[in-house]
Amino acid sequence: KSSGINAEWPLRPGFNKDVTHTGMKRRIENPRIVMLDCNLEYKKGESQTNMEFMQETDFRKILQLEENYIKDICDDIIALKPDLVLTEKGVSDLAQHFLLKAGITAVRRLRKSDMNRVARAVGGQIVHRTEELKDSDVGTECGLFEVKKFGDEYFTFLTKCKNPKACTILLRGASKDVLMEVERNLLDAMNVARNVMIDPFLVPGGGAVEAAVAHRLIEKSKEIQGVGQWPYRALAEALRIIPKTLMQNCGVNTIRTMTNLTAKHATTGSTWGVDGETGNIVDMEDFGVWDTLQVKSQVFKTAIETAILLLRIDDIVSGVKKQSDIDAEKMAGKFQAANPQEGPEE
């Protein structure tokens, strides 16, 4: 949210909602939580509905039926003695009145994804009809329900859960651009952590892997005679673009620095790379910059497959004659048919 001048990451289940009535509690310790997927208001017709009244009392009867329906729904909820009601649909003013009288706080119009996370964090089940509510459906694993205000908006948090299996990360920044940048960085960091958990292997960063693979390809190409060595050299030159780009960004002498990096890989080891701030050649194992093996191998595979795809397309295109060449051949054939060459005179 674009509010405040800092960024915070409170890891707790929460959502961008406030209580439905100002008189309801905004802080409850050890709440009993009921989660619903139904309206707490009178059902309206799915299409146009017309009602014809013959007497004055008929309109009052309709209003009384609506009130009785809302009261029955609220009585089903109040029977379980909850402290907090969360619903994905709406809550009418009359339902708010009955719940407020019973000392129950209500929050409405939660997203389906938020409701699923809350159910995982606090226990209990999401119920679709109030008539089907049971005591086992009530979530009791939340230690504190509280509503906080950040900037101009209210946020609801469910904290101190016994066994939380979900959380909400709230990012705050001075502007939308700052928030988008923070979000991108956070997603990148989370994906890196996920990749390390799935494939727990790391490789040195700073262009060290590209420089090492390029050096091995050059050495391999020296063992091959003829044209067969050029694919190895072409791939090696392509891989060297990564460390060269890092050097150019730092403003150092690219040719001299690249020569030093190649010499390091040829003599001392394969963990030498480029410092992205100064442009110096450093040992990435000591410098502490690493990449995940899963991402790096996927980058290599994608680059090579894309190059192969482009080469295949070039072969196909080059094997097809242009329409202008075909038309020219046809015209030449017609000209020869109209003017056949005469044989030599005897």
Image: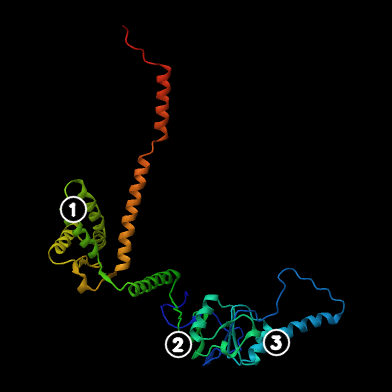
Above or below: residue 51 compared with residue 149: above
Q: Which part of the image, by quadrant, shows the C terminus?
A: top left
Left or right of 276 on screen, residue 336: right
At label 3, the amino acid type is Asp
Instruction: Name the spot of residue 334 as percent of width and height, x first.
Output: 43, 22
Q: Secondary structure at mark 3?
A: helix
Callout in the foreground (1, 3): 1
- Looking at the rendered structure, which numbered label has been put on residue 163? 2
Q: Earlier in the sequence, mark 3 or mark 2?
A: 3
Q: Earlier in the sequence, mark 1 or mark 3?
A: 3
At label 2, the amino acid type is Asn
Instruction: Name the spot of residue 77 as percent of width and height, x first.
Output: 64, 88
* Residue lying farthest to the front in this orientation: 346
User: Residue 251, can we see it?
Assistant: no
Left or right of 153 on screen, residue 333: left
Contact (CB < 8 A) between labels 1 and 3? no
Q: Nearer the viewer, residue 322 or 13?
A: 322
The residues tagged by marks 1 and 3 sit, at their Cα atoms, a distance apart of 83 Å
Q: Nearer the viewer, residue 185 or 167?
A: 167
Q: Which residue does the numbered mark 1 point to in the structure image?
A: 221
* Total numbered labels: 3
Q: Earlier in the sequence, mark 1 or mark 2?
A: 2
* Residue plotted at (67% across, 87% down): 74
At label 1, the amino acid type is Ser
Left or right of 88 on screen, residue 337: left
* Residue plotted at (40% across, 36% down): 322
* Residue lying farthest to the right in this orientation: 54
Above or below: residue 14 compared with residue 343: below
For mark 3, does the 10 Å Cα neighbourhood hold few (<14), some (14 to 19), or many (20 or more) residues? some
Q: Secondary structure at mark 2?
A: loop
- Looking at the rendered structure, which numbered label has been put on residue 29? none
